[in-house]
Image: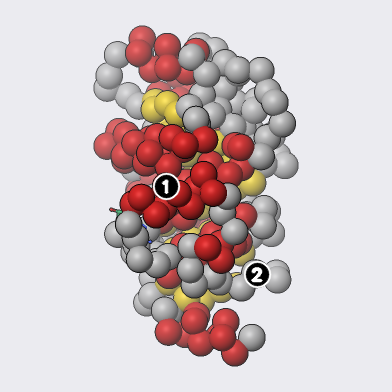
Amino acid sequence: AAAVASHRAKHAIAVSGRDPPSPITTFEEASFPDYVLSELRAAGFPTPTPIQSQAWPTVLSGRDVVAVAETGSGKTLSFLLPAVVHVNAQPYLEPGDGPIALVLAPTRELAVQIQAEAAIFGASSKIKSACVYGGAPKGPQVSALRDGVEICAATPGRLIDFIETRAVSLRRVTYFVLDEADRMLDMGFEPQIRKISDRIRPDRQTLLFTATWPKEVEGVAADFLHDPVTVRVGDASL
Ligand code: ADP
Ligand code: MG
């Protein structure tokens, strides 16, 4: 308990919610399978970042998580590595049936970057990923989805288009991530997020990542997450 308190204090990690697990201090402690650890070693990172140290054990335990940490603090892998584990933990499913892990992001650039990391860290376990965003032809995105997809990074508008035209089904989604939630709300995506969330089974795991914690984000977290653990790193006023 003293080690946990000192790790959290040293890295300015504040945790709230029911029974949060202890943070980890090394990649090995996170109990990732070898196919994830090998990719982490290849990336050459020295240690988990503070948000990863608390988010990984919490997400891997199956809890909903709100993570508030500044830009550049390693939030992407905080949700992507457990996404890879989650996908691999599913029993056999028919291919071509839509994503198991769905990540919503505010911009095309961000969605592309998330999928690129999913491709790298999911490579050794043959994870199939796809990216869905507006302002580009639909054909290639539709074919990528038809080829079978396990992790999908998407902007809300184009995803709704694909849901309505049945280019994608969300019936397999059991891991739902809102990345850069503060920016998505600033850009007016709340109605779209709500619509997408309503299409996903209610017993999914839901994660919300944000750099800031305004009232609007707090409201969305209260609406979409179930009994979450909230992890905040850095300035307590964020
Ligand atoms: P955020 O989403 O919080 O803005 P990112 O997830 O984009 O941050 O990460 C920022 C950078 O840090 C990326 O280049 C990423 O590869 C790198 N990174 C991720 N995890 C670690 C780590 N444990 N150690 C060092 N660098 C890391
Ligand atoms: Mg990010």
Expressed as whole percent of the image width and height from the top left, the position of residue 58 reads 60, 61
Q: CA distance from mark 2 to mark 1?
A: 27 Å
Amino acid type, mark 1: Glu
Q: Within 10 Å of the Cα at label 1, are there few (<14), some (14-19), or many (20+) other Cα atoms? A: some
Q: Nearer the viewer, residue 47 or 62?
A: 47
Amino acid type, mark 2: Pro
Residue 51 seen in this snapshot: no
165 relative to 172 in the view: left or right: left
Residue 4 seen in this snapshot: yes
Q: Nearer the viewer, mark 2 or mark 1?
A: 1
Expressed as whole percent of the image width and height from the top left, the position of residue 69 reads 39, 64
Q: Secondary structure at mark 2?
A: loop
| Quadrant of the drawing holding the N terminus | bottom right
Name which residue lies at 39% across and 27% down.
131
Q: Is residue 161 above or below residue 219?
A: above
197 relative to 184 in the view: left or right: right
Name which residue lies at 58% across and 50% down.
33
Q: Secondary structure at mark 1?
A: helix
Expressed as whole percent of the image width and height from the top left, the position of residue 14 reads 51, 76
Residue under label 2, please give it. Answer: 20
Q: Nearer the viewer, residue 215 or 7?
A: 7
Name which residue lies at 37% across and 77% down.
235
Residue under label 1, please give it. Answer: 39
Q: Is residue 94 above or below residue 89?
A: above
**Quadrant of the picture in which ligand 1 is shown:** bottom left
Q: Can you tell which quarter of the image residue 12 is in?
A: bottom left
Q: Is residue 106 above or below residue 47?
A: above
Q: Within 10 Å of the Cα at label 2, are there few (<14), some (14-19), or many (20+) other Cα atoms? A: some
| Quadrant of the drawing holding the C terminus | bottom left
Q: Can you tell which quarter of the image residue 31 is in?
A: bottom right
